[in-house]
Amino acid sequence: MPSSIPPPKQMAPSTTARVLIASSAMLAFISFWRVAAIVLNDMGSSAFYAGAIAEHFVGKPAPWFVLAIMLLAGTVAALYIESCGMFVRGGVYRVVKEAMGSTLAKFSVSALMFDYILTGPISGVSAGLYLVGLLNELLQHSHSHVTIPMNAGAAFFAVLVTLYFWWENIKGIPESSEKALRIMYVTTIMVVMMVAWCCYTIVVKGGHLPPWPYLRNITYLTGEHGGALGWLRYTSFPYKIGLIGILIGLGHSVLAMSGEETMAQVYREIEHPKLPNLKKAALVIFLYSLVFTAGVAFFSVMIIPDSVRPSFQDNPIGGLTMYLVGPVSLRLVFRAFVVVVGVLMLAGAVNTAIVGSNGVLNRVSEDGILPEWFRIPHRRFGTSYRILNLVVALQLLTIILSRGDIFLLGEAYAFGVMWSFSMKGLAVLLLRYKEPGKRAFRVPLNFHIGKTEIPLGLALITLTLIALCGINLFTKEVATISGIAFTIIFFAVFEISEKVTRKRASERAELDQFNIEAGDNLTPQALGVRPGNVVVMIRNYNTLYNLTATLDRVDPHKQDVVALHLRFLGRAVYACAGTCGEEGENHSSRGCGSNRKVGCDLAICPKSAVICRCARRLSQPAAHRRSSYSWARLGAAHRPQAAVDPCRLHTHRAGTGVLLGTTRSTSHPQRS
């Protein structure tokens, strides 16, 4: 406040200038298109390798298995929509912990981290294979004797892409989501051109659907690590029992459905209205990945001759473009375009893996399992950079150890994704009985026998996921051994870290972390809010009913909400620490929690302190009178433009405080 404003007459004058110190936490919310783009950079990118890897293990019927997996992915998305309707953080860890306890939750998140740690490397290596393949072909046409090693070159490119997106995520998700959206713009152009051209080729040249997935048509890979059968190669079950053969084929195709967990992690950042926007994003993700991933698998088998198709298993879409109808020069140009788009999209999948890993470990840290040290924000960008450093270090180690072998990474990948999905399905199923009642969304196919609900659809999805987990344990030796080892190590780290953290536990364990930014003027421009915003005074972080009600009523497209907390100190303070302090973090964390439920931007002043040096300590009523007097003396021309909700007086032990806003609660409360 300006120092020219005199104090009230009944109070002794002060020669010390009044200073206003505020910090702001601006939550960046994104549209459902950006959410779909982030997830599709993972799920959609599997079209560049999933069909080829599946055919490598089970032969020509592979496209049918990929199609079935994409349909299963749509049902798994329904699981995530139901869980997000119950919890703002509706990912695997939060839901499994609520349904089955902390131990199984830590096991689930350990398996999920194995998925994320492998998603980045497999996408980066696949992008490198496409790029190196194109470069080698160009070198060959230029009569050069130089040849870039495929696996080594792909691994080097994967390292570069991982480091690039590490820095983008250090700067923050808004920039990352913008780049993901741009990648999807270009990819969509390529997909439309490819589908149309492939359909035209089939009409002109003819084509046949892949053989149906009967046992007699499935060709299991034999070789190192048991090939496609793993430890089942010592039995006759895969050759005699049709169901086992189908499960084996599906198990080798599950890498086509990665990315669902990222949808739950990014749900916190979806703009208002949150759940309807999540449904829109899920529908876009399902349709896009179904057409792209399953379509590429079918077109590859129908168009590329059997004799040459194995040579394109490291870049199947690149090979597909070379057997389309049309001039050779046009096909070469389109192949180059496909490779560029593939590199962009697969590189985007690296970003998605980093975003998802960051969200999962942040939630684990908030729950006191990892030390609070991991969540201390970056001083410049405000991101959890220490968690990002850990995730990227593990991904780089995986790339180096795999030496760019796409099939080794693909085989190992299945463990984490299937076990995390299975635990998620089982948890949502148990919550139907542990916490019955109205939900914002339910997985379809539900009926009642008397008063007992029978969630048939949810049960079938869960049983299918568990069956795939079981078959993968016996058919994927690399995935089973490496996955179990990784999960046990991560689980042990979580257990030890939790015990150490609990010894130093405090009420701040689950609080969000904020940086404090000093300023000399509290204006709409300084906070980045629009004129005509709504000011909500908050005092007690346990009673934010007024803030919740205001967020429920305000249209975020028309008005911003400013939550203002004033704390009066008895002596002057000339510097502030790098963080908000315990009380500020309480207000900020609770305020942000209310805000995430509705998904609108919220500028928060968690520790706004009007600092006055007085001869005697002010009582709470006197302090409030002084702030009201100073506000009134500002005059209309100098006050920040703001609309004020109706005020209501609340009496506290220390005196009477004013809370601006009503006290009605939201109609559909969610838990964070």
Image: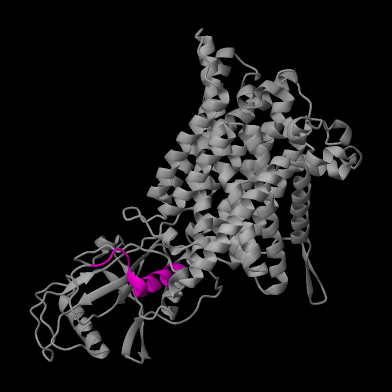
Which image quadrant: the N terminus? bottom left
Closer to the camera in the image, 368 or 457: 368
Q: Quadrant of residue 531?
A: bottom left
Which portion, as a residue range, is magenta? 576-594
x, y percent for residue 31: 48, 53
**What is the x, y in percent for residue 236?**
90, 39
Q: Can residue 274 be seen in this view?
A: yes
Q: In this view, does 278 lie to the left or right of 582?
A: right
Magenta segment, prevailing SS (helix, strand or loop): helix
Q: Does the magenta stretch include residue 523?
A: no
What residue lies at 50% left-to-right and 28% top-to-bottom? 340
Q: Residue at x 50, y 48 (%)?
A: 391
Query: Against 635, is 428 above or below?
Result: above
Q: Is residue 590 covered in magenta?
A: yes
The residue that appears at 43% across and 67% down in the rendered structure is: 592
- The residue under the point 24% across, 65% down is 523
> Residue at the right extreme?
240
Point out residue 55 in the picture as x, y percentages from the top left corner: 73, 31
Q: Would you say 318 lies left or right of 238 here?
A: left
